[in-house]
Amino acid sequence: MSDFHTFEFTTPLTDEDIKKVHIGDVIYLTGDVVTGRDDVHHRVVKDNREVPVDLAGKAIFHAGPIMKKISDDKFKVVSVGPTTSMRMESAEAEFLAKTGVKIIIGKGGMGPKTTQGCIDNCAVHTIFPGGCAVVAAEEVVDVEGVEWADLGMPEAMWKLKVKGFGPLIVSIDSYGGNLIEDNKVLFNQRKEKALEELKGKLDFLH
Amino acid sequence: MAYDTVKCEELSELLSAFICHASGHLPDDVKAKLSELAGIEDEGFAPAIYNVMKKNMELADELGRPSCQDTGIPQFFVRAGTKWPYLDEIEPALIEAVKKATDRAPLRHNAVEVFDEYNTGNNIGHRVPWIDWELVSGSDRLEVYFYMAGGGCSLPGMAKVLMPLEGYDGIARLVFDQMTSYGVNACPPCLVGIGIAGSAEVAAKLSKKALLRPVGSHNPNPKAAKMEDDICEGLNKIGLGPGGFGGKMSVMGVNIEQAARHPATLAMGLSTACWAHRRAQISIAPDLTYEFVTHKGVTL
Ligand code: SF4
């Protein structure tokens, strides 16, 4: 990871912060992270409902956590890792415009609509290593509360306070760079070659 | 024999402990494969990703928590001996075990009722936990394979009926296409399960059964075993790396299961397991002593 830069950011993030980072850079984030995935995006973008949390300058985390109630109004994160960001592709650009979110955290890449959304709204998409949900949970210092709890545990908006949250690998920057799409082009080239080399090896029919 | 409430309760306690353990600990073969792959990957983002994965496994163990927040749809593949004395008790014990484990592990609530579109809140739903049954003639043991079918790792799943002249190459093409698209999001390195049969549903089910076989095991048919190796080698040449960030390898392995096909069809099914391949297998005797096959030496 030597060619890339590492940043430590605290929310609220500014356009200047976001402009410093490029694909392949790594961010460790301190401050406000709010979870939101399919249903939250549906409510905000498709149903046009008012967002119950001020997200300006903060991070939206594509994640459906396991939470434990520790008292009447207090929760603890047991396990919280990223979910597949691509599911939010159709709604994310509009979500950014409506909320002022600066960092999207998820796993896997996102497509051209979100890439344009990141340019237009000066935002980035980042990837937390998938399946590493206990590491992530241990970087959450407090659960401030929950909104839209009626959506159920995985889909609700959990308001988290995090410290040194990461590594967040920047996969889409505010300049139109898209790390995973670049990788996919490479993977597809290698795939064609690998399939070519398989020819003749699987001729079991006669 | 009369329904045995006490045995059912004991069995559900054992199975609940089994589920809880599986949610936080990967099977021995998967752990071994991951550390082998981590040793090979020495460039780019791969070493850093493997480090976080390792730390995650250690923390999950130390804190006694599910290693991934997506604890999936609980699926059981039951091989019940025809001489196992508590056949009636198996299904209620499995359902009860899921309820208990949901509370104790705790597991994420993952059962969303289709059409009515609400989360049941306890991982019990219509046909969930999913239970697949097989009878084993003459045996007095109950063998339970458990799998947590997460969302990301279920997304690459597919089945398609090919025409025989599309050949086994046609199957390989479909697998490669899925792995370079959906597979990138399925928390690689994945274990790839392929089923080959005469119709879509048989191929699909066999692809999931293939995932229940240990990483590194081979199909007893030499041609199938060779196809497992050839596809594995081909996928590795793509270099998806851990998390899809690129690397020297792509997958933990490829397992294939087959059933005889129809002369006019060549059906394929694909299932993938993510690196957090939470699969567990237990073999239980009538007195409820057990062997925890996938997690050697663990007492529940
Ligand atoms: S693909 Fe597997 S490791 Fe990744 S988030 Fe889903 S269940 Fe967890």
Image: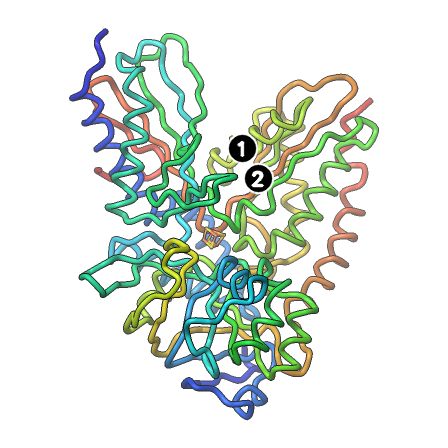
The residue furthest left is B6
Residue denoted by label 2: B271
Name the residue type under label 2: Ser
Name the residue type under label 1: Ala
Residue denoted by label 1: B210
Residue B175 percent across, percent down from the top left: 68, 43
CB within 8 Å, label 1 to label 2 = yes
Work out which quarter of the rendered image holds the N terminus of chain B and state it: top left
Q: Is residue B208 above or below residue B138?
A: below
For the point 40% across and 33% down, the residue is B129
Tell me the subunit letter for badge 2.
B
Q: Quadrant of residue A151?
A: bottom left
Find residue B240 and name its label: none
Question: In whole angstroms, how far apart are the C-alphas of marks 1 and 2?
Answer: 8 Å
Residue B6 percent across, percent down from the top left: 16, 21
For the point 64% across and 50% down, the residue is B179
Crowding at dot 2, Cα within 10 Å, few <14 / some 14-19 / many 20+, comes out as many
Q: Secondary structure at mark 2?
A: strand
Residue in front for this viewpoint, B198 or B102: B102
